[in-house]
Image (cartoon, rainbow, N blue to C red):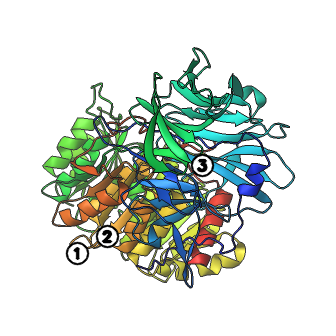
Amino acid sequence: MSSPLRKPLAVATVVAAGSLAALSGVGTATASHPGDAGSASVLTATSTNNQQVLGLSSALTPKECLDTCVPTGVHDASWAPDGSRAVFVTNNLSIATIDYNDGDETGTWWIADPADGVVGRSSPSYQANGSTVVWAEQESGGHWYIARGTSSYGWGYSQISPVGATADYTDPDGGLDNRIVAERNGSEIVVWDGSGNAESDWTKIADGGDPAISPDGTKVAYSAGGQIWKADIDGANPVALTSDASANYTNPTWKPDGTTVAFNSGTSIRTVGSNGGATAATPLTGVKPAYQSQRKNLAARLSGASRFETAAAVSNSYWKTKGTTDNRHEAKAVVLSRSDTFADALGGSALAAAKEGPLLLTPTNSLDTTTKAEIDRVLNSGDTVYLLGGTGAISASVAAALDVDYTVVRLAGADRYSTAIEIANAIDASPELILVATGNNFPDALGAGAAAGSYDVPGASDLKAVVVLTADAVLPVSTKAYLDAQAGDIIAVGGQAATATQGYEPTDRWFPIVGSDRFSTAYFVGASFFAGQTVAGVATGNDWPDALSGGALMGTLNGPLLLTPGTSAQTSPWTGFALSEESASISTVVVFGGTGVVNNTQLNQFGALISGPALYNVGTVTFPATAVSGAGLRASAPVAGNGQHRSLADLKATIKALQDKY
């Protein structure tokens, strides 16, 4: 099918091989990630004509459809930790990824477009949980250096090899944790410790080339003297795995179970045991062998028999029972919203993330028993319960029932618009980001709440973000007064909010995020604010209660809240694009609500979209999620996996680029 969301490559073809050949000894080892116990793995290679990934049941040939489909070419393909995507260099020096079972061009996404002055790129590989990618890059007249960025489109990347170095750093390989191995000057193996970009952050461990970290992160395989070697990650205990005197073996890569190393013998692919021995031929020919590791992901549902029970289930997934020592987190507050309308609640998701607690629901005139039990489960005596809205939203009798054990703080204004401002002020009096959405409907504000909340979790970011409301395309007096008194940037989410706030456009603090419908707007919010996330949330776009409590959780987890027409046979294509694009890093997709709001057909579609050939389990989830090997590890600055936040400049540039492109 044709996608409205293509991230197009320039059609011009610029082959990088010439610039690579100028540096003797440049190899192309590839990352190997641990697979699930007992799972299969597939040995692949890039075809010698640089057009396909071979070794799969159906060879991958990435394409980009502009006016017609044209081959992009494949250089140095390697695999995401779950085998869901391959990353490669294209003929025009973009870094791109493709879905493992791509049937047409719509599964191809871009991480880095061609950059001015860049004349060579090689050896991309996923690092840690798939949230980051490293590669080698060369600018005209300069030395090769190691670059590192997120595994998502539109994010900047940084140089992690020494800035201004007179050495060439090539052939990086990202492993289980923050460490990266690389080749220096075509003859030395060096290890990056995961910190800065000084010479002292890189340590030589061996003479040789083509380094590859073992799946468990403890060993390095490399080529030296025409043979394949292995050593400890610190260079100790070097052992030759091959001893074929007339051979010239290159490009080692580890099998996901660590038992075997594959490598090039010319354009043939051979293997040897990871403890040495006789080499064995394979039927595969090509360059840069790479094993496709296979891990099961998780398609989880958090739900209950009612909106109250669903909100409690969402809370239970993340917030631990007070006084216990399990791996969940300790809540410091609860945000409580009325259960029959969204009017006062739309800023509540961000507040819950900021105050470190769940968002729960109750009827106006009585405290729901499930909700009361959940409050008592997570909060200590004296902790704070925030009530959203006046006594017409949550009655004085409900407040009195809570006041016996907890500190009750009511956030209320004369109407939903001024209530949203009270909620915003409770988060931060002078936020850097002000997201604005219509308060007369719920979809746009729900995604905005998760995005704002992701900045508000204590310690997560130097920025604060809030959500305030418009009356569809009209800017209420209270909201206008608030915006006029603030210096923060205004991000209008949805067409109605964009129209209402358009008067701020000349001030250069106005940035609209507008899709063609609620589903595409949710996609654009997610694409603007999140990247490299390990968790994504999905809720029905046809109702609000489950998405409200789910949005509070997603803000806390720093992942997007996507919307779907949950009772249909097919999900929204926008949701599908979001999950497919981020499938290298997403190991869990969470559906909020029961089968009556998001059916199992869609749940399984979501699981398939984030998964490789090992597919996914279906169940429930608690956070921190039980990790398969390496999942959940967080990379250090400037790219922090599921903990990354865009700078203000990057966020605004991304919003503008997305809106201009689509």
Q: Which residue is mark 2?
A: 564
Q: Earlier in the sequence, mark 3 or mark 2?
A: 3
Disc on res. 568: 1
**Mark 3 in CB contact with mark 2 (< 8 angstroms):** no
Q: How many neighbours does mark 1 have within 10 angstroms: few (below 14), some (14-19), or many (20 or more)?
A: few
**Label 3: element kind:** strand
Q: At which x and y percent is residue 375?
A: 24, 42
Q: CA distance from mark 1 to mark 3?
A: 39 Å
Q: Amino acid at mark 2?
A: Thr
Q: Nearer the viewer, residue 31 or 296?
A: 31
Q: Quadrant of the C terminus?
A: bottom right
Q: At which x and y percent is residue 416?
A: 39, 69
Residue drawn at x 35%, y 62% as measured from the top left: 345
Q: Earlier in the sequence, mark 1 or mark 3?
A: 3
Q: Which residue is mark 3?
A: 124
Residue drawn at x 46%, y 21% as measured from the top left: 275
Residue 362 shows in this picture: yes
**Label 1: element kind:** loop
Residue drawn at x 31%, y 67% as measured from the top left: 342
Label 3 vs label 2, nearer the camera: 3
Count the marks. 3
Q: Nearer the viewer, residue 309 or 274?
A: 274
